[in-house]
Amino acid sequence: MLDIRLLRENPEIVRDALAKRGEDFPVERVIELDMEHRKLLHEVETLRAQRNEASKRLGKTVEKPAGLIASLRQLGERIDSLERQVAEMEAQLEDYLLRLPNIPADDVPVGKGAEDNIVVRSWGSPPNFPFTPLPHWELGERLNILDFQRGVKLSGSRFYILRGMGARLQRGLIAFMLDIHTKEHGYTEIYPPFMVKRECMVGSGNLPKFADNLYHDDEDDFWFVPTAEVPLTNLHRDEILSPGVLPIYYVSYTACFRREKMAAGKDTRGIKRGHQFDKVELYKFTEPEKSDEELEKLVGDAEDVCQRLGMPYRVVQLCTAELGFAARKAYDIEMWAPGCAEWLEVSSCSNCGDFQARRANIRYRPEPKAKPRFVHTLNGSGLALPRVVIALLENYQQADGSIRVPEALRPYIGVDVITRQ
RNA sequence: GGAGGGGUGGCCGAGCGGACUAUGGCGGCGGUCUUGAAAACCGCUUUCGCGCAAGCGAACGUGGGUUCGAAUCCCACCCCCUCCGCCA
Protein backbone atom coordinates (compact mmCIF):
# COMPACT_ATOMS: atom_id res chain seq x y z
CA MET A 1 0.00 0.00 0.00
CA LEU A 2 1.19 3.48 -0.78
CA ASP A 3 0.94 6.38 1.61
CA ILE A 4 -2.23 8.25 0.71
CA ARG A 5 -0.25 11.45 1.30
CA LEU A 6 1.91 10.59 -1.68
CA LEU A 7 -1.20 10.59 -3.86
CA ARG A 8 -2.40 13.84 -2.36
CA GLU A 9 0.85 15.72 -2.58
CA ASN A 10 2.67 14.14 -5.53
CA PRO A 11 0.14 12.40 -7.73
CA GLU A 12 2.51 12.73 -10.70
CA ILE A 13 4.94 10.31 -9.02
CA VAL A 14 2.19 7.72 -8.80
CA ARG A 15 1.00 8.31 -12.36
CA ASP A 16 4.55 8.04 -13.63
CA ALA A 17 5.07 4.77 -11.73
CA LEU A 18 1.89 3.30 -13.15
CA ALA A 19 2.89 4.31 -16.67
CA LYS A 20 6.29 2.64 -16.24
CA ARG A 21 4.62 -0.54 -15.08
CA GLY A 22 2.14 -0.34 -17.92
CA GLU A 23 -0.84 -0.36 -15.57
CA ASP A 24 -4.11 1.50 -15.58
CA PHE A 25 -5.46 2.98 -12.42
CA PRO A 26 -8.09 5.65 -11.60
CA VAL A 27 -5.71 7.96 -9.74
CA GLU A 28 -8.04 10.96 -10.13
CA ARG A 29 -10.97 9.11 -8.64
CA VAL A 30 -8.93 8.15 -5.56
CA ILE A 31 -7.72 11.69 -5.00
CA GLU A 32 -11.29 12.96 -5.26
CA LEU A 33 -12.54 10.32 -2.88
CA ASP A 34 -9.83 11.19 -0.39
CA MET A 35 -10.81 14.84 -0.46
CA GLU A 36 -14.48 14.08 0.05
CA HIS A 37 -13.58 11.70 2.81
CA ARG A 38 -11.52 14.21 4.75
CA LYS A 39 -14.18 16.87 4.38
CA LEU A 40 -16.84 14.57 5.76
CA LEU A 41 -14.54 13.30 8.49
CA HIS A 42 -13.90 16.82 9.65
CA GLU A 43 -17.62 17.46 9.76
CA VAL A 44 -18.44 14.35 11.74
CA GLU A 45 -15.62 15.00 14.20
CA THR A 46 -16.81 18.54 14.82
CA LEU A 47 -20.28 17.21 15.58
CA ARG A 48 -18.86 14.54 17.86
CA ALA A 49 -16.89 17.17 19.75
CA GLN A 50 -20.14 19.10 20.20
CA ARG A 51 -21.93 16.05 21.48
CA ASN A 52 -19.15 15.08 23.85
CA GLU A 53 -19.08 18.54 25.31
CA ALA A 54 -22.87 18.80 25.76
CA SER A 55 -23.12 15.27 27.05
CA LYS A 56 -20.50 15.98 29.65
CA ARG A 57 -22.44 18.99 30.83
CA LEU A 58 -25.63 16.96 30.94
CA GLY A 59 -23.94 14.41 33.15
CA LYS A 60 -23.20 17.10 35.69
CA THR A 61 -26.74 18.49 35.87
CA VAL A 62 -29.26 17.01 38.23
CA GLU A 63 -32.52 17.98 36.47
CA LYS A 64 -31.74 16.41 33.02
CA PRO A 65 -33.73 18.80 30.79
CA ALA A 66 -35.82 16.90 28.24
CA GLY A 67 -35.26 19.51 25.53
CA LEU A 68 -31.51 19.10 25.67
CA ILE A 69 -31.77 15.33 25.55
CA ALA A 70 -34.06 15.53 22.51
CA SER A 71 -31.71 17.82 20.65
CA LEU A 72 -28.78 15.61 21.52
CA ARG A 73 -30.66 12.62 20.22
CA GLN A 74 -31.14 14.44 16.94
CA LEU A 75 -27.45 15.31 16.83
CA GLY A 76 -26.68 11.66 17.47
CA GLU A 77 -28.77 10.60 14.50
CA ARG A 78 -27.01 13.08 12.25
CA ILE A 79 -23.63 11.80 13.45
CA ASP A 80 -24.75 8.24 12.87
CA SER A 81 -25.71 8.85 9.28
CA LEU A 82 -22.51 10.77 8.56
CA GLU A 83 -20.46 8.01 10.18
CA ARG A 84 -21.97 5.48 7.83
CA GLN A 85 -21.04 7.60 4.86
CA VAL A 86 -17.50 8.03 6.15
CA ALA A 87 -17.14 4.28 6.72
CA GLU A 88 -18.42 3.57 3.22
CA MET A 89 -15.89 5.99 1.74
CA GLU A 90 -13.10 4.53 3.80
CA ALA A 91 -13.91 1.05 2.54
CA GLN A 92 -13.86 2.27 -1.05
CA LEU A 93 -10.66 4.19 -0.57
CA GLU A 94 -9.02 1.22 1.09
CA ASP A 95 -10.05 -1.07 -1.72
CA TYR A 96 -8.47 1.26 -4.28
CA LEU A 97 -5.29 1.66 -2.26
CA LEU A 98 -4.95 -2.09 -1.78
CA ARG A 99 -5.04 -2.55 -5.55
CA LEU A 100 -2.39 0.06 -6.30
CA PRO A 101 1.06 -1.46 -7.00
CA ASN A 102 4.34 -0.30 -5.46
CA ILE A 103 6.41 2.49 -7.01
CA PRO A 104 9.49 1.15 -8.82
CA ALA A 105 12.82 2.38 -7.43
CA ASP A 106 14.65 5.01 -9.50
CA ASP A 107 17.37 2.60 -10.58
CA VAL A 108 14.96 0.05 -12.05
CA PRO A 109 15.25 -0.10 -15.84
CA VAL A 110 12.11 1.06 -17.62
CA GLY A 111 10.76 -1.61 -19.92
CA LYS A 112 7.72 -3.23 -21.46
CA GLY A 113 8.43 -6.93 -21.00
CA ALA A 114 10.89 -9.70 -20.20
CA GLU A 115 13.06 -8.64 -23.14
CA ASP A 116 13.85 -5.42 -21.28
CA ASN A 117 15.22 -7.16 -18.21
CA ILE A 118 18.95 -6.76 -17.79
CA VAL A 119 21.41 -9.59 -17.21
CA VAL A 120 23.66 -8.18 -14.50
CA ARG A 121 26.05 -11.13 -14.14
CA SER A 122 26.53 -14.78 -14.99
CA TRP A 123 28.33 -17.57 -13.20
CA GLY A 124 29.66 -20.91 -14.40
CA SER A 125 29.31 -22.31 -17.86
CA PRO A 126 27.00 -24.90 -19.38
CA PRO A 127 28.49 -28.39 -19.36
CA ASN A 128 29.85 -29.80 -22.61
CA PHE A 129 28.10 -33.07 -23.30
CA PRO A 130 29.56 -35.63 -25.69
CA PHE A 131 25.93 -36.66 -26.21
CA THR A 132 22.59 -34.94 -26.60
CA PRO A 133 21.37 -33.98 -23.12
CA LEU A 134 17.87 -35.14 -22.23
CA PRO A 135 15.13 -33.10 -20.60
CA HIS A 136 14.41 -33.95 -16.97
CA TRP A 137 11.08 -35.59 -17.69
CA GLU A 138 12.80 -38.22 -19.74
CA LEU A 139 15.68 -38.63 -17.31
CA GLY A 140 13.28 -38.85 -14.40
CA GLU A 141 11.03 -41.44 -15.95
CA ARG A 142 13.96 -43.58 -17.09
CA LEU A 143 15.39 -43.51 -13.58
CA ASN A 144 11.95 -44.20 -12.15
CA ILE A 145 12.20 -41.19 -9.82
CA LEU A 146 9.48 -39.08 -11.50
CA ASP A 147 5.95 -40.37 -12.08
CA PHE A 148 3.70 -38.04 -14.02
CA GLN A 149 0.86 -40.43 -14.80
CA ARG A 150 0.17 -41.30 -11.23
CA GLY A 151 0.42 -37.64 -10.20
CA VAL A 152 -2.37 -36.92 -12.65
CA LYS A 153 -4.32 -39.94 -11.42
CA LEU A 154 -4.27 -38.58 -7.89
CA SER A 155 -4.79 -34.89 -8.48
CA GLY A 156 -5.00 -34.00 -12.16
CA SER A 157 -2.75 -32.01 -14.44
CA ARG A 158 0.19 -30.12 -12.98
CA PHE A 159 0.71 -32.71 -10.25
CA TYR A 160 3.45 -35.32 -10.16
CA ILE A 161 5.05 -37.86 -7.87
CA LEU A 162 8.68 -37.88 -6.78
CA ARG A 163 9.77 -41.42 -6.08
CA GLY A 164 12.75 -42.98 -4.36
CA MET A 165 15.91 -40.96 -5.02
CA GLY A 166 13.78 -38.24 -6.65
CA ALA A 167 12.02 -37.57 -3.38
CA ARG A 168 15.31 -37.99 -1.53
CA LEU A 169 17.01 -35.50 -3.83
CA GLN A 170 14.42 -32.84 -3.18
CA ARG A 171 14.43 -33.46 0.57
CA GLY A 172 18.22 -33.35 0.63
CA LEU A 173 18.26 -30.07 -1.26
CA ILE A 174 15.82 -28.54 1.22
CA ALA A 175 17.99 -29.54 4.19
CA PHE A 176 21.12 -28.41 2.34
CA MET A 177 19.67 -24.95 1.67
CA LEU A 178 18.28 -24.51 5.18
CA ASP A 179 21.63 -25.46 6.66
CA ILE A 180 23.53 -22.95 4.52
CA HIS A 181 21.19 -20.09 5.32
CA THR A 182 20.88 -20.79 9.04
CA LYS A 183 24.48 -21.74 9.76
CA GLU A 184 26.34 -19.43 7.42
CA HIS A 185 24.09 -16.55 6.39
CA GLY A 186 22.53 -15.76 9.76
CA TYR A 187 18.87 -16.59 9.08
CA THR A 188 16.54 -18.00 11.72
CA GLU A 189 14.53 -20.97 10.54
CA ILE A 190 10.75 -20.69 10.80
CA TYR A 191 8.21 -23.42 10.21
CA PRO A 192 4.95 -21.57 9.56
CA PRO A 193 1.36 -22.63 8.86
CA PHE A 194 0.68 -23.47 5.21
CA MET A 195 -2.84 -22.10 5.51
CA VAL A 196 -3.44 -18.58 6.79
CA LYS A 197 -6.19 -16.09 7.45
CA ARG A 198 -7.39 -13.62 4.89
CA GLU A 199 -5.64 -10.67 6.63
CA CYS A 200 -2.30 -12.31 6.01
CA MET A 201 -2.95 -12.40 2.28
CA VAL A 202 -3.87 -8.72 2.37
CA GLY A 203 -0.74 -7.92 4.37
CA SER A 204 1.59 -9.52 1.86
CA GLY A 205 -0.22 -8.07 -1.15
CA ASN A 206 -1.84 -11.23 -2.55
CA LEU A 207 -5.35 -10.04 -1.76
CA PRO A 208 -7.54 -8.46 -2.89
CA LYS A 209 -6.01 -8.30 -6.36
CA PHE A 210 -4.71 -11.83 -6.91
CA ALA A 211 -7.44 -13.94 -5.38
CA ASP A 212 -7.72 -15.99 -8.57
CA ASN A 213 -4.25 -17.49 -8.09
CA LEU A 214 -4.95 -18.70 -4.55
CA TYR A 215 -6.50 -21.84 -3.17
CA HIS A 216 -9.09 -21.17 -0.53
CA ASP A 217 -11.00 -23.25 1.97
CA ASP A 218 -14.54 -21.89 2.11
CA GLU A 219 -15.64 -23.63 5.26
CA ASP A 220 -13.04 -22.08 7.54
CA ASP A 221 -11.86 -19.21 5.33
CA PHE A 222 -8.31 -20.50 5.21
CA TRP A 223 -6.02 -19.48 2.37
CA PHE A 224 -3.24 -21.78 1.18
CA VAL A 225 0.10 -20.03 1.03
CA PRO A 226 1.45 -19.43 -2.51
CA THR A 227 4.85 -18.76 -0.91
CA ALA A 228 6.32 -18.61 2.59
CA GLU A 229 6.60 -14.88 2.01
CA VAL A 230 2.98 -14.66 3.13
CA PRO A 231 3.29 -16.13 6.63
CA LEU A 232 6.74 -14.57 7.11
CA THR A 233 5.49 -11.07 6.32
CA ASN A 234 2.71 -11.55 8.82
CA LEU A 235 4.92 -12.85 11.61
CA HIS A 236 5.31 -9.27 12.80
CA ARG A 237 1.96 -7.91 11.64
CA ASP A 238 0.59 -5.22 13.98
CA GLU A 239 3.82 -5.05 15.91
CA ILE A 240 6.19 -2.27 16.86
CA LEU A 241 9.67 -3.78 16.91
CA SER A 242 12.00 -2.65 19.67
CA PRO A 243 15.09 -0.56 19.00
CA GLY A 244 18.05 -2.68 17.99
CA VAL A 245 16.23 -5.80 16.77
CA LEU A 246 16.56 -5.00 13.07
CA PRO A 247 17.60 -6.46 10.76
CA ILE A 248 15.67 -9.70 11.20
CA TYR A 249 16.49 -12.58 8.83
CA TYR A 250 14.13 -15.54 8.44
CA VAL A 251 14.36 -18.64 6.30
CA SER A 252 11.47 -20.98 5.84
CA TYR A 253 10.70 -24.16 4.01
CA THR A 254 7.10 -24.54 2.88
CA ALA A 255 5.05 -26.16 0.22
CA CYS A 256 3.50 -23.51 -2.04
CA PHE A 257 0.11 -23.71 -3.70
CA ARG A 258 -0.87 -21.82 -6.84
CA ARG A 259 -3.75 -22.12 -9.26
CA GLU A 260 -1.59 -21.09 -12.24
CA LYS A 261 -4.54 -20.15 -14.37
CA MET A 262 -2.64 -19.65 -17.57
CA ALA A 263 -3.04 -20.91 -21.08
CA ALA A 264 -3.70 -24.64 -20.81
CA GLY A 265 -0.63 -26.48 -22.03
CA LYS A 266 1.90 -23.82 -21.11
CA ASP A 267 4.73 -25.32 -19.07
CA THR A 268 2.79 -28.52 -18.47
CA ARG A 269 5.65 -30.81 -19.41
CA GLY A 270 7.80 -31.94 -16.50
CA ILE A 271 7.90 -30.42 -13.03
CA LYS A 272 8.57 -26.80 -13.89
CA ARG A 273 5.17 -25.43 -12.95
CA GLY A 274 2.87 -27.37 -10.63
CA HIS A 275 -0.03 -26.41 -8.43
CA GLN A 276 2.04 -27.55 -5.47
CA PHE A 277 5.77 -27.07 -5.12
CA ASP A 278 8.37 -26.76 -2.41
CA LYS A 279 10.46 -23.71 -1.76
CA VAL A 280 12.99 -22.43 0.72
CA GLU A 281 12.29 -18.75 1.21
CA LEU A 282 14.49 -15.97 2.57
CA TYR A 283 12.90 -12.99 4.27
CA LYS A 284 14.20 -9.80 5.87
CA PHE A 285 12.83 -6.97 7.95
CA THR A 286 15.21 -4.01 7.80
CA GLU A 287 15.50 -0.31 8.48
CA PRO A 288 14.50 1.75 5.43
CA GLU A 289 18.02 3.08 4.93
CA LYS A 290 19.45 -0.44 4.75
CA SER A 291 17.06 -2.21 2.43
CA ASP A 292 18.92 -1.52 -0.82
CA GLU A 293 22.16 -3.04 0.40
CA GLU A 294 20.24 -5.86 2.10
CA LEU A 295 18.70 -6.77 -1.24
CA GLU A 296 22.16 -7.21 -2.77
CA LYS A 297 23.18 -9.41 0.15
CA LEU A 298 19.98 -11.42 -0.16
CA VAL A 299 20.65 -12.13 -3.81
CA GLY A 300 24.19 -13.13 -2.84
CA ASP A 301 22.85 -15.59 -0.26
CA ALA A 302 20.66 -17.23 -2.89
CA GLU A 303 23.53 -17.28 -5.41
CA ASP A 304 25.72 -19.01 -2.88
CA VAL A 305 23.43 -22.04 -3.06
CA CYS A 306 23.75 -22.12 -6.86
CA GLN A 307 27.52 -21.90 -6.68
CA ARG A 308 27.92 -24.66 -4.13
CA LEU A 309 25.84 -26.88 -6.36
CA GLY A 310 28.07 -25.91 -9.27
CA MET A 311 25.13 -24.90 -11.37
CA PRO A 312 25.51 -22.32 -14.14
CA TYR A 313 23.21 -19.35 -13.56
CA ARG A 314 22.66 -15.71 -14.34
CA VAL A 315 21.23 -12.81 -12.35
CA VAL A 316 18.66 -10.68 -14.11
CA GLN A 317 17.36 -7.34 -12.97
CA LEU A 318 13.66 -7.00 -13.67
CA CYS A 319 12.44 -4.01 -15.62
CA THR A 320 9.48 -1.92 -14.46
CA ALA A 321 6.91 -3.95 -16.39
CA GLU A 322 8.10 -7.26 -14.93
CA LEU A 323 8.28 -6.12 -11.32
CA GLY A 324 5.95 -7.87 -8.90
CA PHE A 325 3.01 -5.96 -7.46
CA ALA A 326 4.64 -5.36 -4.07
CA ALA A 327 8.21 -4.90 -5.26
CA ARG A 328 10.12 -1.68 -5.83
CA LYS A 329 13.19 -3.47 -7.13
CA ALA A 330 13.86 -7.12 -7.94
CA TYR A 331 16.37 -9.60 -9.31
CA ASP A 332 15.69 -13.07 -10.65
CA ILE A 333 18.23 -15.86 -10.56
CA GLU A 334 17.99 -18.23 -13.51
CA MET A 335 19.71 -21.60 -13.77
CA TRP A 336 20.59 -23.03 -17.11
CA ALA A 337 18.80 -26.28 -17.90
CA PRO A 338 20.57 -27.92 -20.86
CA GLY A 339 17.97 -30.65 -21.38
CA CYS A 340 15.01 -28.39 -22.00
CA ALA A 341 17.43 -25.68 -23.17
CA GLU A 342 16.05 -22.82 -21.15
CA TRP A 343 16.89 -20.50 -18.29
CA LEU A 344 14.81 -21.51 -15.28
CA GLU A 345 13.77 -18.95 -12.73
CA VAL A 346 14.88 -20.51 -9.44
CA SER A 347 14.69 -17.36 -7.37
CA SER A 348 13.10 -13.96 -7.37
CA CYS A 349 14.47 -11.49 -4.84
CA SER A 350 12.53 -8.32 -4.13
CA ASN A 351 12.82 -5.24 -2.01
CA CYS A 352 9.25 -4.24 -1.17
CA GLY A 353 10.24 -1.09 0.71
CA ASP A 354 7.49 -0.15 3.16
CA PHE A 355 4.71 -1.40 0.85
CA GLN A 356 3.97 -4.59 2.80
CA ALA A 357 4.83 -2.99 6.14
CA ARG A 358 2.04 -0.46 5.56
CA ARG A 359 -0.47 -3.15 4.68
CA ALA A 360 0.51 -5.38 7.57
CA ASN A 361 1.23 -2.49 9.95
CA ILE A 362 4.77 -3.52 10.81
CA ARG A 363 6.77 -0.77 12.48
CA TYR A 364 9.91 -0.36 14.52
CA ARG A 365 11.20 2.19 16.97
CA PRO A 366 14.59 3.57 15.87
CA GLU A 367 15.42 4.73 19.42
CA PRO A 368 13.71 4.24 22.77
CA LYS A 369 10.73 6.65 22.84
CA ALA A 370 11.15 7.62 19.21
CA LYS A 371 8.13 7.66 16.91
CA PRO A 372 7.51 4.31 15.21
CA ARG A 373 8.40 4.01 11.51
CA PHE A 374 7.46 1.40 8.96
CA VAL A 375 10.10 -1.26 8.36
CA HIS A 376 11.22 -2.36 4.92
CA THR A 377 10.59 -5.96 3.90
CA LEU A 378 12.53 -8.11 1.45
CA ASN A 379 11.98 -11.60 0.19
CA GLY A 380 13.73 -14.02 -2.10
CA SER A 381 13.66 -17.68 -2.94
CA GLY A 382 16.61 -19.53 -1.63
CA LEU A 383 15.68 -21.54 -3.78
CA ALA A 384 12.57 -22.97 -5.49
CA LEU A 385 12.91 -26.72 -5.36
CA PRO A 386 11.44 -28.34 -8.46
CA ARG A 387 13.42 -26.11 -10.75
CA VAL A 388 16.66 -26.78 -8.93
CA VAL A 389 15.88 -30.49 -9.26
CA ILE A 390 15.35 -29.96 -13.01
CA ALA A 391 18.62 -28.07 -13.41
CA LEU A 392 20.49 -30.60 -11.33
CA LEU A 393 19.19 -33.60 -13.27
CA GLU A 394 19.88 -31.96 -16.59
CA ASN A 395 23.31 -30.50 -15.76
CA TYR A 396 24.66 -33.57 -14.03
CA GLN A 397 23.31 -36.23 -16.39
CA GLN A 398 25.69 -38.78 -17.83
CA ALA A 399 25.69 -40.71 -21.09
CA ASP A 400 24.05 -43.74 -19.44
CA GLY A 401 21.21 -41.61 -18.06
CA SER A 402 22.50 -41.65 -14.46
CA ILE A 403 22.96 -38.44 -12.48
CA ARG A 404 26.10 -37.39 -10.67
CA VAL A 405 25.38 -35.82 -7.29
CA PRO A 406 27.28 -32.55 -6.73
CA GLU A 407 30.00 -32.93 -4.10
CA ALA A 408 28.45 -30.52 -1.60
CA LEU A 409 25.13 -32.32 -1.69
CA ARG A 410 26.42 -35.86 -1.18
CA PRO A 411 26.17 -35.86 2.63
CA TYR A 412 22.46 -35.12 2.21
CA ILE A 413 21.77 -37.72 -0.47
CA GLY A 414 23.95 -40.58 0.63
CA VAL A 415 25.08 -41.61 -2.86
CA ASP A 416 27.48 -40.20 -5.46
CA VAL A 417 25.39 -41.19 -8.44
CA ILE A 418 21.66 -41.63 -8.90
CA THR A 419 20.91 -44.69 -10.98
CA ARG A 420 17.76 -46.57 -11.90
CA GLN A 421 16.40 -48.45 -8.91
C1' G B 1 -17.75 -30.90 18.89
C1' G B 2 -20.09 -30.34 24.36
C1' A B 3 -19.88 -27.74 29.38
C1' G B 4 -17.75 -23.89 32.36
C1' G B 5 -14.36 -19.60 33.01
C1' G B 6 -11.96 -15.47 30.76
C1' G B 7 -10.05 -11.43 26.95
C1' U B 8 -8.35 -3.91 29.68
C1' G B 9 -1.83 -0.13 28.15
C1' G B 10 5.32 -3.76 27.33
C1' C B 11 3.60 -7.27 31.47
C1' C B 12 0.34 -8.12 35.92
C1' G B 13 -4.24 -6.22 37.31
C1' A B 14 -8.52 -2.74 39.06
C1' G B 15 -12.69 -0.36 37.08
C1' C B 16 -18.86 -2.93 35.82
C1' G B 17 -23.34 3.70 32.86
C1' G B 18 -21.01 10.29 33.05
C1' A B 19 -14.83 13.67 36.05
C1' C B 20 -11.77 6.82 32.43
C1' U B 21 -6.91 6.80 27.74
C1' A B 22 -8.32 4.40 31.94
C1' U B 23 -6.44 3.45 39.82
C1' G B 24 -2.35 0.53 41.47
C1' G B 25 1.94 -2.58 40.82
C1' C B 26 6.07 -4.58 37.81
C1' G B 27 9.42 -3.44 34.04
C1' G B 28 11.74 0.74 31.32
C1' C B 29 13.66 5.97 31.04
C1' G B 30 15.24 10.56 33.54
C1' G B 31 16.41 13.08 38.17
C1' U B 32 17.70 13.87 43.67
C1' C B 33 21.13 11.60 47.10
C1' U B 34 26.23 8.84 46.56
C1' U B 35 33.40 8.51 45.25
C1' G B 36 30.47 4.65 42.39
C1' A B 37 26.39 1.41 42.92
C1' A B 38 22.10 -0.28 45.65
C1' A B 39 18.09 1.41 48.55
C1' A B 40 14.79 5.44 49.22
C1' C B 41 12.23 9.49 47.11
C1' C B 42 10.39 12.57 42.72
C1' G B 43 8.97 12.79 37.62
C1' C B 44 8.02 10.53 32.74
C1' U B 45 6.32 6.09 30.34
C1' U B 46 0.11 3.56 23.95
C1' U B 47 -1.10 4.33 19.05
C1' C B 48 -3.68 6.26 14.88
C1' G B 49 -6.45 10.08 12.06
C1' C B 50 -7.65 15.32 10.80
C1' G B 51 -5.41 20.21 11.34
C1' C B 52 -0.17 25.38 9.72
C1' A B 53 -1.22 25.45 14.80
C1' A B 54 -4.02 25.67 19.24
C1' G B 55 -6.59 21.61 19.37
C1' C B 56 -10.24 18.00 18.10
C1' G B 57 -11.60 12.97 17.13
C1' A B 58 -10.88 7.51 17.56
C1' A B 59 -9.27 2.78 19.90
C1' C B 60 -10.56 -1.44 26.69
C1' G B 61 -10.79 -9.07 21.54
C1' U B 62 -14.06 -8.00 16.77
C1' G B 63 -18.73 -6.42 14.78
C1' G B 64 -23.66 -4.80 15.78
C1' G B 65 -27.39 -2.83 19.36
C1' U B 66 -29.46 0.06 23.74
C1' U B 67 -28.46 5.23 25.66
C1' C B 68 -28.04 12.30 25.54
C1' G B 69 -23.54 9.42 27.07
C1' A B 70 -20.66 2.47 26.98
C1' A B 71 -14.38 -0.45 29.17
C1' U B 72 -19.01 -0.78 31.98
C1' C B 73 -25.71 -3.08 29.76
C1' C B 74 -27.68 -6.50 25.46
C1' C B 75 -26.72 -9.72 20.94
C1' A B 76 -23.48 -12.28 17.53
C1' C B 77 -18.74 -13.82 16.30
C1' C B 78 -13.40 -14.68 17.26
C1' C B 79 -9.49 -16.10 20.50
C1' C B 80 -7.38 -18.14 25.17
C1' C B 81 -7.79 -21.38 29.66
C1' U B 82 -10.06 -25.82 32.36
C1' C B 83 -12.86 -30.42 31.99
C1' C B 84 -15.16 -34.11 28.57
C1' G B 85 -15.23 -36.40 23.56
C1' C B 86 -12.27 -37.35 19.09
C1' C B 87 -7.40 -37.55 16.99
C1' A B 88 -1.46 -37.86 13.76
Image (cartoon, helix red, strand yellow):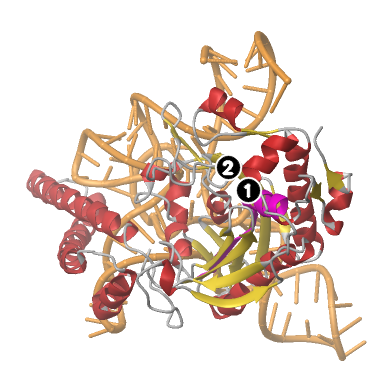
Q: Quadrant of the C terminus of chain A?
A: top right
Tell me the subunit letter for badge 2.
Answer: A
Corner quadrant of residue B19:
bottom left
Identify the magenta region: A374-394
**Residue type of the residue flagged with mark 1:** Pro
In the image: residue A121, left or right of residue B88: left
Q: Quadrant of the N terminus of chain A?
A: bottom left
**Residue type of the residue flagged with mark 2:** Gly
In the image: residue A372, left or right of residue A335: left
Q: Is residue A170 magenta?
A: no
Q: Nearer the viewer, residue A81 or A358?
A: A358
Tell me the subunit letter for badge 1.
Answer: A
Q: Does the magenta stretch include residue A386?
A: yes
Residue beneath label 1, please?
A135
Q: Residue at x 15, y 67 (%)?
A: A32
Q: Position of residue A124 (x, y in %)?
A: 71, 71
Disc 1 is placed on an element classified as: loop
Q: Which residue is drawn at 50% across and 56% down?
A: A238
Q: Residue at x 53, y 44 (%)?
A: A225
Q: Position of residue A392 (x, y in %)?
A: 72, 53
Please tell me which of labels 1 and 2 falls first in the chain.
Answer: 1
Residue A270's label in the rendered image is: 2
Q: Is residue A46 above or below residue A120?
A: above
Q: Are marks 1 and 2 in contact (CB under 8 Å)?
A: yes
In this rendering, does residue A198 appear at all? yes
1 or 2: mark nearer the eye: 1
